[in-house]
Image (tube, rainbow, N blue to C red):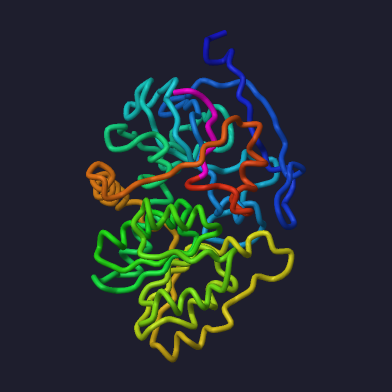
Amino acid sequence: MSAITSLTNHQVRLAQRPSGTPGRECWNFTEEAVGEPAAGGVLVKTLALSLDPAMRGWMNEGKSYIPPVGIGEVMRAGGIGKVVASANPKFAVGDLVSAALGVQEYCLLPEDQVKRSGMFKIDLRAGSMTQWMNVLGMPGMTGYFGLMDVGMPKPGETVVVSGAAGAVGQTVGQLAKIKGCRVVGIAGGQAKCDWVVNELGFDACIDYKAGNVKAGLKEHCPKGVDIYFDNVGGDILDDVLARIGRGARIIICGAISQYNNTTPVQGPKNYLSLLVNRARMEGIVVFDYADRYPVAVAEMAGYLKDGRMKSKEDIVEGLETFPEALIKLFTGANFGKLVLKVAEA
């Protein structure tokens, strides 16, 4: 028996489709022997996993931009890992890589899945391992292309971003400031609001837990909202639609306030504001921009290096904590990008 095949892979598999918030009953913890990679394949040891609101949607059956996770399958998740065995000339043992690894300790990828997983080497000179799951990872890419390609910011415009202290929101707000915009965040709790203003440089932040979002928008966006980057949906989307200016652009990234509903998703009631203001609402799915990730990574790595951009990660340890860690996303308990640490590098 080789050193590889003597290893045991611990995994988290989807046991049932959730109704409302996914509890521990939705997961099965399994284990199996680790296999050697076949020609063109790669075996990766998972070091850390990115926990993202989109994972809740992947658990639902039905048509979407990506097939749902099947019952009994390892839960889908992106992450950072180390190559421990390789039969692929593009990857060597010891390489640090980013890929769709799944919620498991080891990921064995056959040749055809190496490309489909989006695997690429990461360079720790550009950013730390956790930053590669935040500003330089999928959340950062979502924020970058959502703001730049869909929002098309111009200097002097007012940008509002909900979920401002989260992974996508923190990137959007800082990038908008770099591009010369006035930025107003919406976040839950005074500590998060203080952080995005005092540490990230937002011009203002509205605490939706403490008061009236509509009043806060009136105070901080007296001339209206030019760009709204929506991560939460629901009532907050309606409040912002009531304040948009002519030609506004609304980027629909997510609707975390709706993901665990057991009733139909609440759509915008103020959508006629789009007509009155000749405004546009458009969705962003980050995978559409995969061929341009290196451009965004290079730009934002530069901002991290020169101090114009910061990142904050909320790190939870242990594969066994996955069910409870995931729920933090939907209660607002996380502060910054939520990362599940699986193993030491």
- Vertically, is 211 above or below 117? below
**Does residue 193 lie above or below 339 as drawn?**
below
Closest to the observer: 54 or 313? Answer: 313
Extreme residue toward the top, this view: 1
Q: Which x, y percent locates residue 294?
A: 28, 47
Is residue 42 placed above or below 182 in the rendered structure?
above
Q: Quadrant of the N terminus?
A: top right
Image: 224 above or below 298: below
Looking at the rendering, the stretch of residues picked out in magenta corresponds to: 338-345
Quarter holding the C terminus is top left
Q: Residue at x 26, y 59 (%)?
A: 178
Q: Residue 49, how many percent across, how many down?
A: 51, 37
Q: Is residue 219 magenta?
A: no
Foreground residue among 130 and 1 = 130
Q: Nearer the viewer, residue 51 or 190?
A: 190
Instruction: Give how far across and how far down residue 100 sits, in percent.
Output: 48, 40
The answer to whether residue 269 is left or right of residue 193 is right
Looking at the picture, tell me which residue is in the foreground, 203 or 98: 203
* Residue sitting at x 51%, y 60%: 187
Tally of numbered discs: 0
Q: Picture quarter containing residue 160?
A: bottom left
